[in-house]
Image (cartoon, helix red, strand yellow):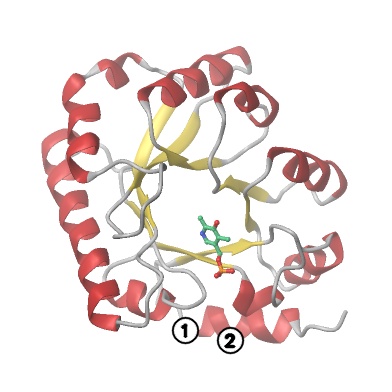
Amino acid sequence: MNYDVKGNLQKVLGNLPDGVRLVAISKYHPNEYIQAAYDEGQRIFGESHEQELRQKHTSLPQDIQWHFIGHLQTNKVKYIAPYVTMIEAVDSLKLLREIDKQAERCGRTIDVLLELHIAEEETKYGLTPDACRQLLADGEWRQLQHVRICGLMMMASFVDDEAQIRSEFRQGHELFDELKARYFADAPYFRERSWGMSHDYPIAVEEGSTMVRVGTTIFGPRVY
Ligand SMILES: *Cc1c(COP(=O)(O)O)cnc(C)c1O
């Protein structure tokens, strides 16, 4: 292993206050690296491709909590539904319905986050704040008994301007507070704000992240 996974992991953990959890983003990294982090006590890992996740889930320790962090096609939900701990990037009612259906078939309830799109970059993924409000106002989600909406996930713009990044996380936090008050005031599980990656997680933590998703800083550059 040419990367000090254990040392880097401890450094990141040392920067996280109590109550902020680390999702170690292991996509494109070999099992050996994941095992090294696991041996240090890390249990939550994030992947963004269904097949890669399937292989890793099969060959690595069974008590790993896998988060699916990428764009998920509805036809792939059935493959991860039996074991995934959280699906972080739900950006349509259609996907939410499919997760509910597959979770029911497995006799489980799957935790999900709604993916918020605030960053200025063009992307087809993520819900604008208004789309997010609409999805919840529509109310169909209340009938979906096998998914549990636990909060929001977002990525800030990939820029050097710290003020802009901070302002985007702040908008995410404000929307979280609004939705919490309107729909989830009695739902203690609605508590996650998944923001912060390698380049911006210290800012994210200052802006109220409860869950950071850090890959490169722990495992090094990805080899695609
Ligand atoms: C890859 C990825 C990350 C981790 O990014 P790093 O810059 O390697 O820390 C976090 N979140 C999402 C959604 C990702 O796709």
Q: CA distance from mark 1 to mark 2?
A: 7 Å
Residue 65 visible in this rendered orientation of the protein:
yes
- For residue 54, side relative to residue 42 (left or right): right
Report the number of numbered marks.
2
Q: Nearer the viewer, residue 202 or 160?
A: 160
Residue occupying the point 83% across, 43% down: 55
Circle 1 sits on which residue? 15
Percent position of residue 187, x then y: 26, 37
Q: Is residue 18 above or below residue 65?
A: below
Q: Quadrant of the N terminus?
A: bottom right
The quarter of the picture where residue 112 lies is top left
The quarter of the picture where residue 148 lies is top left
Residue 186 visible in this rendered orientation of the protein:
no
Residue occupying the point 31% across, 50% down: 117
Evaluate if marks 1 and 2 touch, with contact meaning CB atoms under 8 Å apart: yes
Secondary structure type for disc 2: helix
Three-letter code for the amino acid on which mark 1 is drawn: Asn
Circle 2 sits on which residue? 11
- For residue 108, side relative to residue 120 (left or right): right
- For residue 206, side relative to residue 68 (left or right): left
Percent position of residue 146, x then y: 46, 21
Q: Quadrant of the C terminus?
A: bottom right
- For residue 169, side relative to residue 67 (left or right): left
